[in-house]
Every structure is written in C-alpha cells, then in structure tokens.
Amino acid sequence: MTIDIRRAVVLGSGTMGSQIAAVVALAGYTTALVDIRQEQLDHARAELTKRLDRDVEKGRRERADVDAAWERLTLTTDRDAVAANADLVIEAAVEDLTIKRSIFAELDAVCPPDALLVTNSSNIVSSRVADATERPGKVCNLHFFNPALVMACVEVVPHEGTDPETVEAAVAFVESLGKTPVKLKKEVPGFLANRLLNALRREAVDLYEDGVADFKDIDLAAKTALGHPMGPFELMDLVGIDVVYLIRLAEYEQTGDPASLPAPSITQKYEAGDFGRKTGRGWYEYPAE
Ligand code: 3HC
C-alpha cells in the first residue's frame, strides 16, 4: 500500500523547523508551521521572508514559486486543528525526551490514524518516542541539516518496528522535496553525519582547550586543508551552541559515558547565553545587521 502525503505539519518554528516548513511548502505540500509562541512564529515569518526574497533577488528561485509556497504555508499556534488533517507531522521541537514523548502521545490522539509521525531529532532515536503512540510502525526519524533550505541530505532512520511502507513513503517524500535521502539500516544516536561531525568537533575542541591553537586557526585548517565549507567552530555557531550542548546531554543520557558530556568551553558558552549566530555571539561575534 502506498502512503499518500499531501498535508504536512511541522512542529517547532526554530531555525530548523521554519526552514523545513519552507522546503515542504516550496515542494507543493499544504503545510502548517506550528509553535506554542506567536512571537516565535512572527520571527520565523520574518526570517523566511528575508531568505526567500533574497533567493528570488539572486535568481535562485522564481517569485511565483515563492508566492505559491506562502499561499500553501500557514503559521499557527493551533496545533490540534492542523494535526487533525495531517498526513505527515515532522516534529522539530527541543531535544528533550520527556517533551518529545508527550508531543508524540498527543499527536497520536489527534492525527488521522494513517498519518506518519516523524522526528527531526538528530540524537533521540525514534524508538524512544514511538512507544508513546499506538502507531509505532508509522514513526521514524527524518533528519534535516542546517540550513535546511540549502543542505541536500536528509537521513531516514527507521527503528526496529517501523513499517517498510513508512520508510518507503519517507524516502519518496524526501525525494519529492528535491533532497537526497540517506537511509540507515538501524538506529544509532547521532546517525551518520552527526557522528562524523562529532568526531571532528571533539578533536577541534580538545585542541583548543589544550591550548594547541586558537579556534580561528583550527577553523582555518578545516577549510584550507580539508576543503570543508566551514570550520567546526563556525559550524557550532551556525547550528547553535545551545543545540550542540543539549545534543551532548541527550547523548550522555543514552550512553552514560562521561565522554559524551559537553566540553567545558561549550558549557561555559551555553551558561553565558552565547549560542552563536542567533544571539549575536558564540565563538565569533555577529554584529546586528
Ligand atoms: N539559511 C538559509 N540559507 C543560507 C544560510 C542560512 N542560515 N546561510 C547561507 N545560506 C545560503 C544563502 O543562499 C547564501 O547566499 P546569499 O548570501 O547570497 O544569500 C548561500 O547559502 C551562500 O552563503 P555564504 O556565502 O554566506 O557562505 P557559504 O558559501 O559558506 O555557504 C553554507 C553557506 C551553505 C551554510 C556552507 O557554508 C555550508 O555548507 N556549511 C556547512 C553546513 C553544515 O555542515 N551543515 C550541517 C550542520 S549539522 C546539522 O545541521 C545537524 C543538526 O542535527 C545539528
């Protein structure tokens, strides 16, 4: 049986959720972007408008396509109203297992019984939320990368009980977005790309904390010797140091291995509220435009 996806809901209008919703609306789906805070939705609308208008100016998208995507995209705080008609819900809320489990249980109660419920979590594997629902076979991870409007990869990660039709539909959905699905055969926290990235980041932070080099020079090595588009410190500022910190804590909670805990310099920036681009300061400074 093929699963027909027409209406999608994205939960959480932070950096990831808002760009994922834009990608989905641009691909032709009737899309709702949901948040509990109206101010966050207003911010998401302003940021997306800026991004998409710039894409039009630069000739990367057609004005008509962007206008049509806005027609298809609703920003709302009324989750249950849009979830009641959804074929697919993408959860992009905070990396907190308790919150995610209650979201999945609530979605299960309001969404149509055939709807797929997926999480964009990079670290919390879907088996940990699937059993909060009565439809574990329709649950998997669909992991986008930051900035979601630009990055091609989306990891498709089933848990042991995910139905093969769900995986098939998820892969077809990712392809329909013009993205590249990368399939995992089994769950592992961090999936593929983040595990590769974590290895690099861990080494970069160790080198910095050991006083071997300035973080700017470590970034320079990654860019000029390895051809990476951004160094590991620039990337932390893009992804958000709060996100990096919470991912490490979520991993520690799953592994119990002290090596999973955030490094002292990351904890210090997290506690100071220096989250990177979004707060104007992280490893680097980002003066307001
Ligand atoms: N949102 C949307 N589009 C963006 C963007 C953003 N935050 N930043 C850049 N872009 C787009 C814009 O179209 C921009 O063109 P413009 O300046 O004319 O508008 C274009 O990318 C080029 O940007 P820049 O000239 O500023 O810089 P780059 O050429 O270096 O490209 C980049 C930016 C695409 C972000 C590139 O540096 C890159 O690929 N960096 C690595 C990103 C990466 O590794 N992402 C994965 C992070 S891990 C993750 O997401 C996992 C999660 O679980 C934490």
Image (cartoon, rainbow, N blue to C red):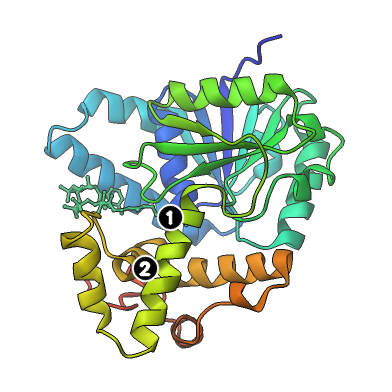
As shown in the figure, which amino acid type bears the numbered disc 2? Lys
The quadrant of the image that shows the C terminus is bottom left
Q: Does the residue labelled 1 lie within 8 Å of ligand 1?
A: yes
As shown in the figure, which amino acid type bears the numbered disc 1? Thr
* Pointer 2 residue: 278
In terms of secondary structure, where does tag 2 sit?
A: helix
The picture places residue 152, in percent across and down from the top left corner, at: 36, 36
Q: Is residue 32 left or right of residue 283?
A: right
The quadrant of the image that shows the N terminus is top right
Answer few, some or many: residues within 10 Å of disc 1's Cα (few below 14, many 20 plus, some between 14 and 19). some
* Pointer 1 residue: 15
Residue 100, placed above or below residue 112: below
> Spatial distance from mark 1 to mark 2, Cα to Cα?
9 Å
Residue at the spot 54% in from the left edge and 25% down from the top edge: 171
Discs 1, 2 touching: Cβ within 8 Å:
yes
Q: Which of 169/88 is in front?
A: 169
